[in-house]
Image (cartoon, rainbow, N blue to C red):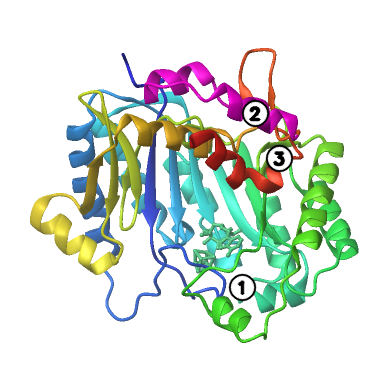
Amino acid sequence: MDRSNGLFGVYVHWPFCAAKCPYCDFNSHVHRGAFDEAEYVAAYDREIAHAAKQAPERLVQSIFFGGGTPSLMQPRSVAAILDSIAKHWQIDPNAEITLEANPTSVEAERFRGYRAAGVNRVSLGVQSLREKPLAALGRLHSVDEAVAAVRLAQSIFPRSSFDLIYARPQQTLEDWQDELTEALWLTEGHISLYQLTIEQGTRYFDLHRTGKLKMPDEDLAADFFELTQELTAAAGLPAYEISNHARPGQESRHNLVYWRYGEYAGIGPGAHGRLLVGNQRHATATEKLPFEWKKRVDARGHGLVTDDILTWEEEGDELLVMGLRLREGIDPGRYQALSGRAISPRQIADLKGYGFLETLPNGNLRVTERGWPVLDAVVADLAA
Ligand SMILES: C[S@@+](CC[C@H](N)C(=O)[O-])C[C@H]1O[C@@H](n2cnc3c(N)ncnc32)[C@H](O)[C@@H]1O
Ligand code: SF4
């Protein structure tokens, strides 16, 4: 049985940031001292060559520069990495090429350079359209700068998106209604809306633990989520994934590669991948510390610290975890083909009984809006 669904994307992680935001636990580092960007770009080239040896002859349908802050890269570095990808794989002429950008004015100056390099979509980390929360989130841009960056991006790139964080300390439902309404006027076809989560190892984690950061309780968080669904749907950008909203046809194709459980190569420090090697799905991860990653690549041509073959059961579990985030749901037939077993009809019936799960006319199983707030529990029940 062919374990591929034909989807293939490349994720490129750029791990550097101008400052560390107090809520963020992504693999991001503020580099101090000498830093030679071209040397890093050469290491990306070598790691791409290694991934292409593991998974040759793929058609790349999407490329995503994520971070960290890829908008700190020189446009020529982005162009060089795209050239490396094109040297080792065929890039679909219609490929979606996204770059994550922070909306400071300095970074906006590079937008035309990224477009010339081949980037055709940007995703901007706006986070809030209010000054006080922006400062509390430790952001380096103002609201005006963010709005100007969104407008500039819309004028330069065929597609763009921006991120907001909601359910923040002290935020009321009324505040969010006003802020989101403004954001929906500003957006063109796609917006990502994340509820603030408190992650271990961040400054927010310590503040929260010591009672200095009051988060909304479960009921209020559920109200925030419900309001978000209502406003986005009314504006014509319904959720296609739990935190992602788009006009039909404007969904992020790269993220769909993950959620539809396709194949992707993870390049750069701390990047994850899922590659089919000899029809076995490998879960890969690279060294997170940039300097250590580069040393490894220099020594062995790749920065992999994990390269595990997944069991069929693990593949089935991952398909559920990823696919049930989507409004389109999952194909139970593919689950059975990958995992070698069917989802228990009793579990399905029980969850349908609670109103958490439904079968669509095409046979796909999906979590209902009522089930979304308890998504993790639904996935755990189906995987059991
Ligand atoms: C890792 S960031 C990279 C993008 C870019 N560096 C930026 O900050 O705009 C990707 C997105 O994750 C979201 N994010 C990061 N940490 C979060 C948290 N603790 N809670 C909710 N959203 C978070 C933010 O919306 C951010 O735009
Ligand atoms: S939120 Fe973005 S800018 Fe802030 S530390 Fe994380 S990756 Fe860097």
Which residue is under mark 3? 371
Query: Within 8 Å of ligand 2, the CB of disc 1?
Result: yes
Q: Are marks 2 and 1 in contact (CB under 8 Å)?
A: no
Residue 254 shows in this picture: no
Which amino acid does the dot numbered 3 rest on? Answer: Gly
Q: Which mark is residue 331?
A: none
Magenta region? 330-354
Q: Residue at x 59, y 41 (%)?
A: 157
Q: Is residue 19 left or right of residue 310?
A: right
Please give the count of numbered marks on the rendered protein: 3
Which residue was labeled with disc 1?
139
Across and down, in percent, residue 165 comes to: 68, 61
Q: Nearer the viewer, mark 2 or mark 1?
A: 2
- Mark 3 and mark 2 lie on one chain; the one further toward the N terminus is 2
Q: Residue beneath label 2, please?
A: 366
SS at badge 3: loop
Which residue occupies the foreground of this view, 195 or 48? 195
- Horizontal side of 292 relative to 145 (left or right) equals left
Three-letter code for the amino acid on which mark 1 is drawn: Arg
- What secondary structure predominates along the stretch shown in magenta? helix
| 309 w.r.t. 211: above or below | above
